[in-house]
Amino acid sequence: MTSTQTPNGFSLDNGGRRIVVDPITRIEGHMRIEANVDEHNIIRNAVSTGTMWRGLEVILKGRDPRDAWAFVERICGVCTGCHALASVRAVEDALDIRIPTNAFLIRQIMEKVLAWHDHVVHFYHLHALDWVNPVNALKADPRATSALQLAVSPNNPKSSPGYFRDVQNRLKKFVESGQLGIFRNGYWDSSAYLLPPEADLMAVTHYLEALDFQKEIVKVHTILGGKNPHPNYMVGGVPCAINIDGDMAAGAPLNMERLNFIKLKLQEAFEFSQNVYVPDVIAIASYYKNWLYGGGLSAKNLMDYGDCPTVQGDPSTDRFPGGVILNGNWDEIHPIDARDPEQVQEFVTHSWYEYGAGREDIGLHPWEGVTDPHYVLGPNTKGTRTNIQAVDEEAKYSWVKAPRWRGNACEVGPLARYILAYSKGVPYVKAQVDDALGRFNALAGTSLTPREALPTTIGRTLARALEAHYCAQQLLDDYDALIANIVNGDLATANVAKWDPATWPKEAKGVGLVAAPRGGLGHWIKIRDGRIENYQCVVPSTWNGGPRDAKGNIGAFEAALLGMPMSNPEQPVEILRTLHSFDPCMACATHVMAPDGDELARVTVR
Amino acid sequence: MTANKTEQAAHPLGRVLILGIGNILWADEGFGVRVVEYLAARYHFPAPAELMDGGTQGLYLLPQLEGLDGLIIVDAIDFGLPPGTIHTVRGADVPATIGARKMSLHQTGFQEVLALLDLRGHAPRQVALIGVQPVNMQDYGGGLTPPVAARVPEVAEAVLTMLANDYGLRPTPHTTNAAEDETSLVTAAVTRDAYESGRPSEEDACRHGDPRVLARMGG
C-alpha cells in the first residue's frame, strides 16, 4: 500500500481493493477506470485509461487545409460540427481571413443548435439513467407525477395525470414484451437510486419527449448546413447563399420562409429547455441533495478559451468568457492565450507516446505536438500486453495525453464555463445560477451556495442544463442579429479573397478554438506550401480524461472519483454517474484499439 | 439528402431508406458509406427511395429513421466469416446482429437507435442489413482493403435487387447531364477517390502499427 499526495492537492492510496470498470458504457468511445476502495468502499485512488490509440493528426498531414474540416467532421458521431468549426477557424486564423457578418452569425447558430441538442441528448439518453430508475417508474401513481410536474414546472402544459398514465402504459407494454431494450444495462436494484416512483415516471416521460423533440431542432442544421448528417462548412464563410425573396429552387438559398421556420424551431428549443430540461435537473438533483460528491478538480482549476462573442473578433464580448481559475480562487481569472508556447502544453510521461530521448517529461505546445505511439507497460502491471488486469499508474497507462495550462491540470466543460462566467459576473449566468439554486434549495430544504453546489457531480449536470438554455437564448439573439443584418442589405456569406493557395504565405500557423459541448476545444494547424504540415487537436475529453503528468498532478476524471463512497463496488453506479457528468467523448480523445462486442461493462473487484 | 425530398412524394409506399453506416477514416469500416456513395454516383433514387450517408451518427440518425416502410442498412460487420464475404440478415436478426457482431464505436449507438424506434412505435415496417466481412478496421486514415473494395459493386447490386423485389422500386441510371448535387452524396474532399488517393505515404504521415493491435491480429 502506498499513500501519496499529488502536487495539485489530492491524496491517493492504492491499497484496499481494486475495481476495474471496462468499458465505461454510455459514452462515445472506449475507456476504462480502475479504482481502489478502502474498507468503507470509499474510493481512494482512481486511474483513467483511454483504451484507444489517438491517431487523428496523422491522417491530416499532407492534405489541403481547406478540406481538413471534412475529415475532422468524421472523427466521431457526436462532435461533428465542433471539429469542423474549430478546423475552419484554425485555417482562417492562419491565413488571416475575416468572414462576413452573416457567416459569423450563421456559424454561431449552427454551433449552439449543436450544443443545445448535444446537451439534451446527453442528459436524457446517456446520463439520466444514472439518477433515474425506469423500472421504478412503472410503480408510480400518475396523479403524483402530475402534482410533481406542476410543482417543479408550472408552465409545462403536458402535466395531466392522463398524459403520464399513457406513457406509463407504453413503457409497461415495452417492458412486458420482454425487451427492456435501451434500459437493459442498468443496476436497477441498486440502493444508489433515490428518486420516488413519481419522479422516475416524470423523467422517463421527458426522455421520450426529448427523443421526439430532438428531430425538430436538427432541421436547422439541414437548412444552414445544406445537409444533415454531416453539414457542410467552408473556409472563409458558410456554403449557404441568401436570397430573401427566393423560392425553393435548386440550390435552396436561405429565404424568408426558411428563416421563419428556423425561428420557430429556436423558440421551441427555448421552451423545451425552460419548461422541461432545466426543471427536471433541478427536481432530480433535489432528491440527491446529500450526494454532493464528484467535484474533484472543479473545486480548484478550471479552463475555457472563451467563445460566442457578439462582435466578431472581440473577445471582450464573449458570452462565454474565457480564462483560467486556479486553486479555487474565483476572484482571479487568468487570461489564456492559446498561441503562447508556455501556456497550453501536452505531456506524455504517463501516455503511450514518446517525444524522443531526454524529452520524456517535457510538455509540447500543440504547434510543436508529436503523436508517436509507444506502448510499454510498467513493472507493476498485472496481466499481459493484450489483456491487462490492472495497469501500473506509476508508468505509462493511457492512450490519452495530459494537457496542462502552465503546468496545471484543469477541468473543462459547461461547469468550467459557468464558474468562469459566474465569477466574472456575466449577468445572464449570474441570474440563472442564483435562480436555479434558489429553486433547488426550496425543493430540497437546503441553503447551498454556488461554491458548495457547483463543484460537484450534480453541479456539472446542472451547469450543462443551464448552458443549454443560455444557448437557446443566444440563438434567438443571434437570429435577430442575422435578420437585422440581412434587412440592412448585407447578403454576403463567404469571403473567397484567399481561396486560392497562390495567395497564401509559404508558411503559416493558426489556432481554432470552440466552446464545444464537452469543453474548450482547440485545433492547431501549421501550413507549408499550401499543405498541412502539422495538425493537433486538443479535445475536452483529453483535458478531463487524461492521465497524470510528469509531476504527478492528476486530471479531472481521476480527481472527481476520489472520496466518493460506493453503495456496492460490484455495481459501479456512482463511478458511472460521475464520469457521465463530464459527457466524455473518448472517440475524440483517442482511437479504437480493441474490438469489443460487450454490452455491459465488465466489473472486476480484486 | 435534403429533408424536403420526401415531402414531394405522394406514393402509397412510405419512405424506403438505404443507409450506409460506418467511419470512413478506419479502412473497411467505411464500407457502408462507400456503397451509398457508389449508388448515388450512378443512379437516381426517386422518392420514396432515399440514400443516406449515416457515418457514425448513431442516435443522431433517429429523426431520419422514423416511420419508414423499409430500411436497408449497409455496413461492415464481423460475422466471423472469411474476409470479403457478403452476408444479409433481416427483421429481428438485424439488431441482434449489430449488437453481437459490431466491432466499432457506433455499435451500441445503432442498436439503440433501432430499439428506440421500437419503443416509440416508429420502427421500420421492414428492415434488412447487407454486410460485408471486413479485413482491417484499424488502419486509421486508410481506405477500403482490396477484398472489401471489390465487394462495393456487388453489394450495390444487392441493394438494387432488394429494392426491386421487396418494394418494387427501380432507381434509374443517371443521364450524363445529371446535376452534381444529385450525384454526390459525400463531401468532395472525402469521397472515396479523393480520400484514398490523397493519403500521404506511411513515412510522411508517420504511421506506426499499434503493437496491441498487431498482437491481436497475429493471434
Image: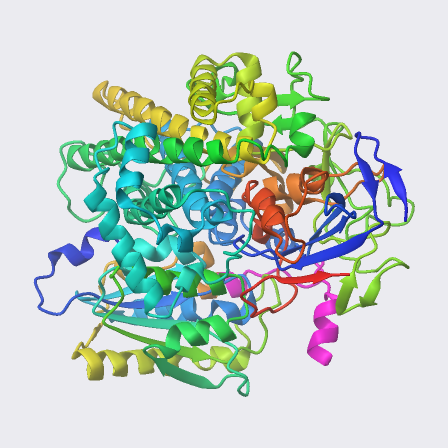
Say whether residue A29 is left or right of residue A264. Answer: right
Q: Which residues are magenta?
A: B195-219
Which of the 4 image quadrants contains residue B36?
A: bottom left
Say whether residue A312 is left or right of residue A25. Answer: left
Picture layout, residue A323 above or below residue B132: above
Say whether residue B205 is left or right of residue A472. Answer: right
In terms of depth relative to the viewer, which is nearer, A572 or A115? A572
Q: Is residue A52 visible?
A: no
Quadrant including the C terminus of chain A = bottom right
In terms of depth relative to the viewer, which is nearer, B137 or A428? A428
Q: Is residue B133 visible?
A: yes
Where is residue B188 drawn, in percent x and y? 41, 56
Where is residue A366 drawn, in percent x and y? 69, 39
Where is residue A304 drawn, in percent x and y? 59, 28
Say whether residue A356 is left or right of residue A411. Answer: right
Question: Is A487 in the magenta?
Answer: no
* Residue found at x 42% / y 70%: B32
Where is residue A85 drawn, in percent x and y? 47, 39
Question: Is B203 in the magenta?
Answer: yes
Q: How many marks?
A: 0
Picture layout, residue A285 above or below residue B146: above
Picture layout, residue B31 above or below residue A530: below
Which of the 4 image quadrants contains residue B159?
A: bottom left
In terms of depth relative to the viewer, which is nearer, A233 or A547? A547
In terms of depth relative to the viewer, which is nearer, A516 or A573? A573
* Residue found at x 84% / y 40%: A550
